[in-house]
């Protein structure tokens, strides 16, 4: 790869070369975004994790990991309950199209298929034909 001083170009080139890395980066950005949104909404409402948990019908130990960017076990049902407890609603939308990626590439090392739908990278379980 030609040398460049533009960090964004370097990162984009690396992600284009390594589909596994692109998927991992997208997953981490997704988790960090959810964590940040829950934290910011909770603190803006002036609630502790325990108070939010009570309002959402759960316990603080469930709320805490959701506010951690490394956590990836969020369920839409729980996120909806959290949004309702904060007096907001959960919006789920498909994002804008991104650079087109190969349609399907088996990743035997991790036992998954990586699939690009509408230009966005998604993961599905192994042996999935789509």
Image (cartoon, helix red, strand yellow):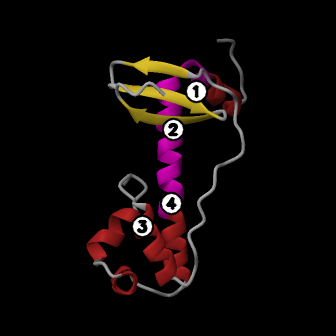
* Of pointers 1 and 4, the one earlier in the residue sequence: 1
Q: Residues within 10 Å of mark 2 (few under 14, many from 20)?
A: few
Instruction: Work out whether 30 lies above or below 102.
Output: below
Residue that numbered label 2 is attached to: 25
* Of pointers 3 and 4, the one earlier in the residue sequence: 4
Question: Magenta residues, as a range?
Answer: 14-35
Real-space Cα distance between discs 1 and 3?
Answer: 32 Å
- Label annotation for residue 15: 1
Disc number lying in front (1 or 4): 4
Real-space Cα distance between discs 1 and 2?
Answer: 8 Å
Q: Nearer the viewer, residue 61 or 119?
A: 119
Disc number lying in front (3 or 4): 3
**Labels 1 and 2 touching (C-beta < 8 A):** yes
Residue that numbered label 4 is attached to: 34
Q: Nearer the viewer, residue 126 or 60?
A: 126
The image position of residue 28, as x and y in percent, is 47, 45
The image position of residue 62, as x and y in percent, is 30, 70
Instruction: Work out whether 107 lies above or below 29.
Output: above
Circle 3 sits in a helix, a strand or a loop, which is it? helix
* Of pointers 2 and 3, the one earlier in the residue sequence: 2
| Residue at screen point 57% across, 18% down | 17
């Amino acid at each position: 790869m030609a040398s460049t001083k533009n960090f964004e170009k370097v990162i984009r080139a690396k992600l284009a070369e390594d589909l596994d890395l692109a998927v991992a980066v997208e997953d981490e950005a997704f988790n960090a975004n959810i964590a940040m949104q829950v934290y910011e909404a909770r603190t803006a409402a002036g609630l502790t994790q325990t108070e939010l948990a009570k309002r959402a019908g759960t316990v603080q130990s469930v709320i805490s990991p959701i506010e951690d960017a490394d956590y990836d076990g969020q369920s839409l049902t729980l996120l909806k309950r959290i949004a309702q407890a904060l007096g907001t609603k959960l919006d789920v939308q498909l994002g804008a199209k991104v650079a087109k990626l190969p349609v399907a590439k088996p990743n035997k090392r991790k036992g998954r298929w990586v699939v690009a739908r509408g230009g966005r990278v998604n993961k599905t379980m192994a042996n999935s034909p789509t």
